[in-house]
Amino acid sequence: MLSQRIFGLACGYADANDAARLAQALAAFVQSGVRSRLAMQAEILALRHQLGVYQRTCARPRLKPADRMLWAWLSRAWSGWREALVFVKPETVIAWRRGSSASTGRG
């Protein structure tokens, strides 16, 4: 629990529950280790992450740098990332991946 709190603070999360959800999703993804299930695990990670973002925001999701890093990584590691993406445009994620400072994260 302490490690999740430290992880959350390092990623800019004020609420330990947000960090715990992300840490659990990442741990489930890493622990799966079965190559044939990679797409399914990545989709679960993507959906859990989006749910966590929606739960911690009121009107519109406010993405943090850790959120952008996750989606930039997913866009490189998983071919099905576009189908799971709900709250930003795929072009925005590609801009994050390229390191564009012009992206605002609005979908």
Image: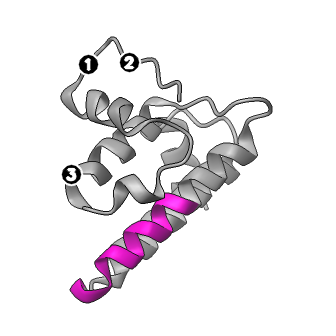
Q: Pick the residue in front: 6 or 58.
A: 58
- x, y percent for residue 7: 49, 47
Q: Of label 3 and label 2, which has the lower sequence position?
A: 3
Q: Are marks 1 and 2 in contact (CB under 8 Å)?
A: yes
How crowded pointer 3 is (Cα within 10 Å; few <14, some 14-19, many 20+) is rated as: few
Residue drawn at point x = 37 percent, y = 52 percent:
82
How crowded pointer 2 is (Cα within 10 Å; few <14, some 14-19, many 20+) is rated as: few
Q: Does residue 53 appear to the left or right of 41 in the view shown?
A: right
How crowded pointer 1 is (Cα within 10 Å; few <14, some 14-19, many 20+) is rated as: few
Reading the image, the residue beneath label 1 is 100
- x, y percent for residue 5: 59, 49
Q: Of label 3 and label 1, which has the lower sequence position?
A: 3
Residue drawn at point x = 69 percent, y = 45 percent:
54
Quarter of the image holding residue 101? Answer: top left
Q: Are marks 3 and 1 in contact (CB under 8 Å)?
A: no
| Residue bounds of the magenta highlight | 35-47
Reading the image, the residue beneath label 2 is 103
Type of amino acid under label 1:
Ser
What quarter of the picture does the N terminus occupy?
bottom right
Q: What is the distance, in whole Å, between disc 1 and disc 2 at their CAs?
A: 6 Å
Q: Secondary structure at mark 1?
A: loop
Type of amino acid under label 3:
Arg
Q: Say if the magenta span includes residue 42.
A: yes
- x, y percent for residue 9: 55, 37
Reading the image, the residue beneath label 3 is 76
